[in-house]
Amino acid sequence: MMRVIRFGIIGCGLMGREFASAAARWMHLTDMKARPEIVAVCDTNAALMDWYSDHLPSVAQKTADYRELLANPEIAAIYCAVPHVLHADMYPEIIASGKALLGEKPFGMDRAQNATIMAALKEGPGQLVRCSSEMPFYPGAQRVIDFIKSGALGDILEVECAFLHSSDINPDKVINWKRMVDVNGAYGCMGDLGMHVCHVPLRMGWRPKTVNANLVKRVTTRPDGKGGRVPCETWDNATITGMVGEGPDAFPLVLKTWRIAPGESNTWSIRVLGMRGSAEFSTKNPRQWRFMRYEPGGAQAWQVEDLGYQSLFPAITGGIFEFGFADAIQQMWAAFVDELVGGDANGFHCATPDEAAAHHAILTAALISGVEGRVTEVEYPQ
Ligand SMILES: NC(=O)c1ccc[n+]([C@@H]2O[C@H](COP(=O)([O-])OP(=O)(O)OC[C@H]3O[C@@H](n4cnc5c(N)ncnc54)[C@H](O)[C@@H]3O)[C@@H](O)[C@H]2O)c1
């Protein structure tokens, strides 16, 4: 019998719906020990909750007060997808309730708020807590990760991870909370996209000791949706570089979080270059990864392999078919649910709170670097 894990969702916006959809087609996955069942939803915008109760007969509780979900003994786990400034208000209470938590990134709006969450974890009962980051669950990303782990790179020349968006190139795009410093945080584009680009490097143990960040601010006002324009103060683009390791083996890590990357709708990519092997994957070509194995004096020839749907968690879709964003979300949820019932997430678990805290250390140093124009030391939590 497949176990059932009862979930409550706090924040019924864009990402809440993605989880609901992934859970509703759980039969897509062929080999799961447990399945999520969404029994409660919470949002301060009451209109959003009807979509959930209309589509999911299992939803028995709808409330604007998240504490009512935490008091519901039926619920074993929470997905929390609310604006950044609320993470540090809610995650500590969720942790104290003893319910498992998949919290959206960036796990606190800034480093101080992340520290509040990390302190709550130290005090907490020790249940499973993870941070959302789905892009590394693309099969092509998994191949690059396996390639790195196999040692195929040899001496590393450079690693680049990027997340590129472009909708903000339109100066007439109405402002939303992601462009407001007091709700999204002073990191701007880095808080929005930073966890996505830090997840794999941190999992590989690559921690830059110092960073240099170039921050770009192009669109300074935006429509307020009511006929006027308001200041838009968050950073649009960040290019962060840091050296990983020391001495002759050190290599540059380049992290790009751009909200204004012309033509890129939602491109996540990773490229690793080494003396013996190189590999890359981009969601622009979701079916393919590219790699090169090099022997001294031999040919330097990239190979391109169509992977299709060769997912970390097996699914009904044939391996030749394309994999997409909604699939990456479902694979991330499979990893979380598998860990909830004692599994090892098939070798690639969701981002951990420690990884989220380390990414805050990088982003905080990057913000100082970008604003003050100097190379800045990254102070990782002990
Ligand atoms: N993993 C990803 O790829 C990804 C993508 C987008 C956003 N996110 C993250 O998801 C989170 C939410 O972003 P989103 O795009 O879904 O935003 P959204 O604005 O679509 O949804 C947030 C929801 O939270 C609700 N909310 C606000 N205050 C609340 C409160 N006190 N109690 C209950 N609900 C409240 C809002 O009404 C809204 O419906 C953020 O942390 C963001 O960084 C992750």
Image (cartoon, rainbow, N blue to C red):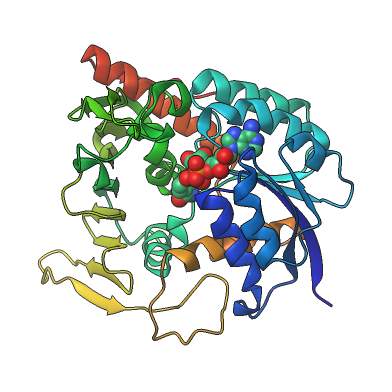
Farthest front residue in view: 227
Residue beneath the point at 10% across and 72% down: 299
Quadrant where the C terminus sits is top right
Across and down, in percent, residue 252 comes to 25, 38
- Rendered view: 372 above or below 21: above
Quadrant where the N terminus sits is bottom right
Residue beneath the point at 24% across and 26% down: 221
Across and down, in percent, residue 350 comes to 57, 52
Across and down, in percent, residue 238 comes to 26, 33
Pick the front one: 346 or 99 = 99
Total count of labels = 0
Residue beneath the point at 64% across and 81% down: 30
Answer left or right for 375 relative to 125: left
Answer left or right for 14 relative to 98: left
- Residue 302 seen in the current view: yes
Specify the quadrant of the image occupied by residue 35. Answer: bottom right
